[in-house]
Image (spheres, helix red, strand yellow):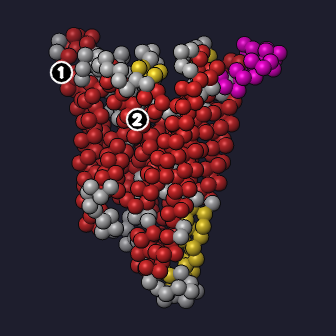
Amino acid sequence: MHVHFKRKLGWTIAVLILYFVLSNVPLFGLSPDSIDLFAQYRAFFAGASGSLLLLGIGPIVTASIVLQLLVGADIIKLDLSNPRDQAIFQGGQKFLVLVMIVLTTLPQMVGANPYIKPDLGLAASMGVDPSVLWWALFIQIFIGGVLIMFLDEIVSKWGIGSGVGLFIVAGVAQALVTGILNWQLDQGMPIGIIPRWIWIAQNMGASELLSGEGFRFLLISGGVLALITTIIIFLLVIFFESTRVEIPLAHSAVRGARGKFPVKLIYASVLPMILVRALQANIQMVGMILARKGNTLLGVYDAASGKPISGLMYYLNPIYSPYDWIPSLVHQNYPDIATWQIALRLGCDLGLMVIGGMIFAVFWINTTNMGADAVAKQIQRSGMQIPGFRRDPRILERVLERYIPKVTIIGGALVGLLVVVANMLGTIGNASGTGILLAVSITYRLYEDIASEQMMEMHPMIRGLFGKE
């Protein structure tokens, strides 16, 4: 059923407002000593620390990874071009999201020294056992996870774009605004770039800033490099999104009706990057939980920062700033880490993002009806064909096969490389290269979706080209 553009826009705005409201509802009974296990992934996992949306889109993404791997490996045999199998896939994904909400929450709440703790002082003042607050926290977090899932479904069905994408943009935008304007102090200096520059101008002289050490301080600690990196990422993503191969189309029945099917350089979008980072986040969660229980088989974690400093988990931990890979900066905090270990960690992150980006990009197009066979059938149903070729979906598929698989793999590798380089240089508000990349790309595609929705509203026959009813 076709939903009018104004109604879609209304649903999208309503969901976005509700998301911001829920992300500011604190968890009742949460101890101030609790630790946010996914703090470094927060910008693109959406949600907010200590809020009802503590888990963000993590369970949705994790469920998608598991299901895509099972379908891609033919362990679960589903033809995702078949509407019936699509419905089974979507139903299975919802069930798996509920399972992942539980599996993500419980390990953080159980054990002798859990990450999510009930407030013992509040329990004592209320005259209840701490286990009551424990269950209250679990129920609140579970409800928050379910609400995110349904908000995502509302946007996907009655809104514009996807809920996951909308929440990522909201989370990254919030991080960017905070990173620019936040006046709170960190190690004696304001966190936000503008307040920090004002502080530097008031407390440091020109001769000090123009020295070699002063220039490095201004570039890294002053946030100049992060600002430049953020702007460059923004421009590069816009450039990549606008780079495309356009396949000419003509209507088989309506003479003179022509169009083009664009195969973008980032054909699979940047959303597969969420899947790669979610995989890393879940691996890190396992390592942190084991370390918390005294098992350092996978790595040792720094008690103050919660970051791995040795073992397999150190090499699988993403690079997020110059302080993670420039030896002199790393040794300021962790002098025992050897230079070769830093280089190996950087190589692992680069390899995981590039190879993982390619693999998940292929999975993404196959599970979202963006593959050559599915696109050929959509074009065939719309009455369009490639000029000079017979009107046969098999011919359309062969033509599309020349471009879609290759562009998908190249785009996935390119996005993975861009994410690592951006993280190496740092970004405003610690939004991370992945977060900035996702936010810009999603916003760009959201703009395109709005434009196409308006066009289909004015010209209903165009909906047939997109498989709409």
Magenta stretch holds residue 68? no
Q: Main secondary structure of the magenta part?
A: helix
Relative depth, front residue between 77 and 455? 77
Q: Which residue shows up at 37% across the image and 72% down it?
A: 469
Q: Residue at x 53, y 70 (%)?
A: 402
The reply, left or right, for residue 66 in relation to residue 403 is left
Frontmost residue, 100 versus 183:
100
Q: Quadrant of residue 299?
A: top left
Q: Which residue position is annotated with label 1? A: 132
Q: Is residue 195 visible?
A: no
Counting the numbered discs, the total is 2
Relative to 241, residue 245 above or below: below
- Disc 2 marks which residue? 281
> Hey, what amino acid is under mark 2?
Ala
Label 2 Cα neighbours within 10 Å, binned few <14 / some 14-19 / many ≥20: many
Q: Is residue 205 magenta?
A: yes
Give x and y (percent) for residue 369. Answer: 40, 64
Q: Secondary structure at mark 2?
A: helix
Q: Position of residue 248 (x, y in %)?
A: 58, 77
Which tag is nearer the camera, tag 2 or tag 1? 2
Image side of residue 377 versus residue 89, left or right = right
Q: CA distance from mark 2 to mark 1?
A: 29 Å
Residue at 44% x, 51% y is 360
- Which span of residues is magenta-colored? 201-221
Task: Provide residue 343's location: percent of width, then percent of height.
Answer: 58, 30
Contact between marks 2 and 1 (CB within 8 A): the answer is no
Q: Quadrant of residue 311?
A: top left
Amino acid beneath label 1: Val
SS of the residue at dot 1? Answer: helix
Residue 454 rendering spot, x and y as whole percentages: 51, 65
